[in-house]
Amino acid sequence: MKRSWRAALTLLALFAVAGSARPDSGCRYLWLTRDDLASPADIDRLLERASESGANGVIAQVVGRAEAYYWSDILPLADFDQSFDPLQYLITRAGPMGLEVHAWVNAFLVWSSPWGPSDTTHVCYAHPVWFMEDAQGRSTLTYSRDECDAAGLVGATLSPVYPGVREMLADVAQEIVTWYDVDGIHLDYIRYPNESFGFEDESRSRFYFETGYDPRGLRTGFRAPSQEMLDLWAAWRQEMVTETVSTVRARLDACSPDIMLTCAVMADPVDAKSQYAQDWREWLLDGDIDLAMTMAYTTNTDRARQLAVSGTSVKASRLVHGIGVYNQPLSTALVGAREALARGAAGVCVFSLNTLDEDDAFGLGSFWSLAGGPGHDPNPALFYRSGCGAAR
């Protein structure tokens, strides 16, 4: 097929950054958002694009706003053509193409639309007490769209302090792996929105019981809190998120031990831990997750290289460098990916398949070919869970 001038320029740029190293790029994934799971025609079109790119598999958002793009007994169904099961159709079509399917589940974020859910069984109505609150005691469930944007909040967000939240997430993961032949569970929004949230009564009372301090006073008190107390509060929040990941890991180990567990994580590991209570490097070291997929969507190439360096500083062989093509040309997005691979990263994940055009699919396939390594063998889900993917 004749390629456009843009595809030719992309290929030239790939050769320009190729260098002498030939790092392994065994994990080659594409995030697939829920918007294009609504019909068989959409799925067919995007799987064909994924195959053209040389990907190993797709990470498909089958739980977005606490609604299921599959037949669920736990969650209300999303808005899709209910003459078919989107996840089952995706699996059936992807398998013969050599593509893995990982079920992407939004963890704490459960609603982001300006209007509320239509199904009265939705968690927003069933468990309103489970939602994060700000330092003034206001629930994220009550924030308007404009207020969310101003506060750095995507939408209504569940708090990991509640055992019911952790168990619901584990139940969803178990339901998917029990009824569908997926290769993995992929958790997104497994973090606090920022340091301004997480002051619900349950969090305050538990932290007070353990330390004798009300965390709300750390932000609204007249006297500046000690660094020791701030560190304790930060560590406690991190523990809440980690406990959620561990709960899902334990459930998967009990019901489907070969299933891969991965997480989409903030690309800077220091910021991830300090600002979002997302200590993903510790998750890797403790074996709670099999792969961390960094969201390094920056359009600044210097920053992209920095994120590649910091991301691969611990357990590089279990780090998949995530890049964005929705906001920049593929050639610049790949700068950080190349750096991460050269430092031992397990592969690259692209956000998102929905925005990947034909030229970029060709360019991505060329990049992966230059990077070397297996495209589909061995299966990363078995490779890493078996322990064979340990440090190189």
Image: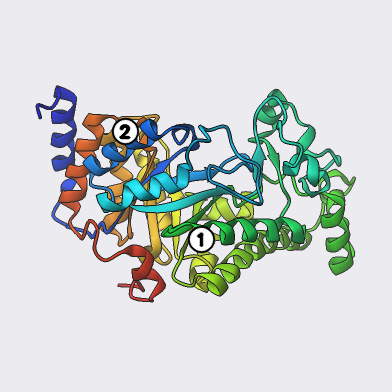
Q: Amino acid at mark 1?
A: Val
Q: Residues within 10 Å of mark 1 (few under 14, many from 20)?
A: some
Q: Quadrant of the C terminus?
A: bottom left
Does 95 sit above or below residue 52? Answer: below
Does 281 sit above or below residue 154? Answer: below
Is any part of residue 161 visible from this angle?
no
Residue sitting nearer the eye, 80 or 26:
80
Q: Residues within 10 Å of mark 2 (few under 14, many from 20)?
A: few
Q: Which residue is depicted at the point 26% across and 56% down?
A: 25
The percent position of residue 90, horizontal first and vertical second, equals 39, 45
The percent position of residue 110, horizontal first and vertical second, equals 66, 41
Q: Which residue is mark 2?
A: 45
Q: Is residue 189 left or right of residue 38?
A: right
Q: Which residue is mark 1?
A: 177
Q: Which residue is depicted at the point 42% across and 37% down?
A: 298
Q: Which secondary structure, mark 1?
A: helix
Q: Which residue is depicted at the point 57% across and 32% down?
A: 79
Residue sitting nearer the eye, 208 or 360:
360
Instruction: Tell me which numbered mark, 1 or 2, is placed earlier along the sequence.
Output: 2
Q: Is residue 300 left or right of residue 233?
A: left
